[in-house]
Amino acid sequence: MNPLRFRLSLSALALLALAACTTAPNRPTSDTEVKWLTAAERGDIEGMLELAELYERWNDRRALDWYERAAAATPWSFRNTIAEEALGRIWASGAMYTGRRPEDTPPPVLRASPRKAGRWYLAAANHGSPGAMLSLAKFERERGHAAAALRWDLRATVYQRYSTSSSGLPAAIAPQAGALHPLVVDIQRRAARGDAQAQVDLGALYERGMGLGIERDPAMALQWYRKAALQGNVFGQYFTGLLLGRAPPGVPRDEAAAAGWFAKAEAQKFFLAGESYWRKGIQPAFWTFD
């Protein structure tokens, strides 16, 4: 046997034994557990995620520790956001996904924490996870935070090029009797004052033709995205790149400029701004649901 591998295996077994004396349920050590713990202790993020998912299926609190380690692992990749989103999901309900039928699901092993859930969902969304954007929109909507829910619905819509049925968009913010929806009015006001997040929101409204009582205006959307991008807002940078790459009517295609904005977003750990992702993201859609 390779001496290094033998030492790692012994180390993994020792760690398992120590954990079993403290926090773990009374369960025999499995070969799968040893395999993934050995990989995780080497710093392998896939091993960390596999181990966390294994513990989660066992309804074991150690899943939290390994998801947190995976979220902080380097070098950075989309796998970090998988861990961040999983932590948001667990803390939102206090329950782990065990894969069992509802009637066989064990009781939660921790108390739900909306504060922690929101923090982890936000981290994943700000690092480019489309799933986290949708989860965050649902999370905020269920808590009665309409403005925050709208923000994440809009951002997911821009990335996906269509609205989800759960968002209610565009009807949810449509003008009525000639008056703009109060949420839209507030976005306009804050954007005009220089709020970068609101500038991204307003850009999304123009890009998708929502809430303003006008048809789409991609050129105006680009102006607002750029204002946010110049302030360092990662969504402003990413959406500027998308518009320049997708080149909707009124926006000339400029892949060189788009690549520059994507590079700025990627530097902020926004994984969708990596070249292999953004090149797919700017390709023409096969279909839309507008």
Image (tube, rainbow, N blue to C red):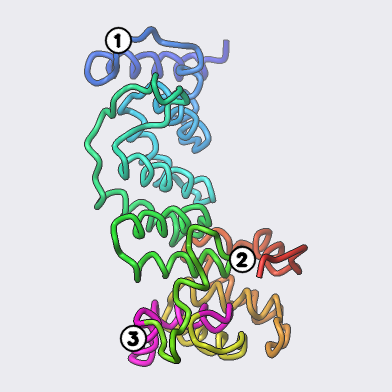
The residue wearing badge 3 is: 190
Q: Residues within 10 Å of mark 1 (few under 14, many from 20)?
A: few
Most foreground residue, 98 or 66: 98
Label count reads: 3
User: Which residue is at 49% across, 77% downward?
Assistant: 236
Amino acid at the residue labelled 3: Arg
- Residue 2 higher or lower than 115, as above or below: above
Is residue 4 rendered magenta in the image? Answer: no
| Mark earlier in primary sequence (2, 1) | 1
Most foreground residue, 205 or 255: 205
Most foreground residue, 23 or 264: 23
Numbered label attached to residue 26:
1
Amino acid at the residue labelled 1: Asn
User: Which residue is at 29% across, 57% downward?
Assistant: 143
Numbered label attached to residue 170:
none
Tag nearer the camera, 2 or 3: 2
Tag nearer the camera, 2 or 1: 2
Say whether residue 161 is left or right of residue 252. left
* Residue segment shown in magenta: 182-210
Numbered label attached to residue 162:
2
